Amino acid sequence: MSYKTQFELSQLITRTPPKKLGLTPTNKSILLHIVSFMNSSFECYPSAKKTSEISGYGEATINRGIKEIIITKLLTKKNRTNNHIKTSNFYSLNKKELAYRVYGESTTVNKPKEENNSKKEHLAEDGNYYISSTDYYIQRAKKNETLKSMA
């Protein structure tokens, strides 16, 4: 799926339920605010303060939400520096991951080929294979604990 404009991308995210994106409603809103800053290459560098001002969420909520969005692989973050001094964060949208979450099987992002799945593991909603559904829920719980400890 290719997006010609930031507006088309915003529409796609807006019309997709948060659960399908792997996000909470708050994090979906934060993602939409970040996307509103993106250029034609789907990259931007808004500050948490600016995002907080336009969204109405506190800076702590913005920072926590961004961490959680990054874990879903929908967004990547790099530090921008000037003479080795951090100036801001640089965000980039992972269009393939977004297409996978929205359209499912139509893409192979994060999905091993079936012939490589000799153990006949179970494909989970996050697009990865697990030995059992229990293993998936254990991994998800660990990820949630990690998020809580980061806050």
Image: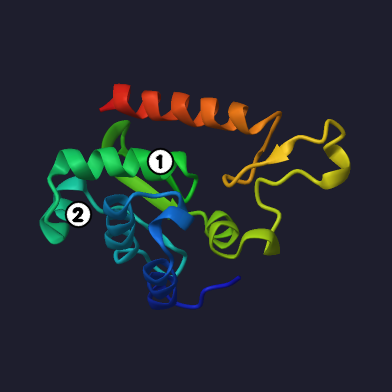
Instruction: Where is residue 59? Give x, y as percent.
Output: 15, 43
To which quarter of the image does residue 68 belong?
A: top left
Amino acid type indicated by mark 1 = Lys
140 to the left or right of 131:
left
What is the spatial separation of the Cα atoms under label 1 and label 2, in whole angstroms? 17 Å
140 to the left or right of 111:
left
What quarter of the picture does the N terminus occupy? Answer: bottom right
Closer-to-camera residue (66/40): 66
Rendered residue at 65%/40% (across/down): 128
1 vs 2, front mark: 2
Instruction: Where is residue 10? Give x, y as percent.
Output: 38, 71
- Count of labels in the image: 2
Q: Mark 2: give few (<14), some (14-19) or many (20+) Cα within 10 Å.
A: many
To which quarter of the image does residue 64 belong?
A: top left
Instruction: Where is residue 121? Give x, y as percent.
Output: 76, 34
What quarter of the picture does the C terminus occupy? Answer: top left
Instruction: Where is residue 112? Give x, y as percent.
Output: 75, 43
Rendered residue at 35%/29% (across/down): 147
119 to the left or right of 146:
right
Rendered residue at 43%/77% (across/down): 8
> Which numbered disc flags the more N-terminal residue, 1 or 2?
2
- Residue 5: numbered disc: none
Amino acid type indicated by mark 2 = Thr
Look at mark 2 in the image and give the residue it sits on. 51
Q: Mark 1: give few (<14), some (14-19) or many (20+) Cα within 10 Å.
A: few
* 130 versus 56 height, above or below: above
Closer-to-camera residue (106/5): 106
Task: Describe the element under mark 1 as helix, strand or loop.
Answer: strand
Look at mark 1 in the image and give the residue it sits on. 78
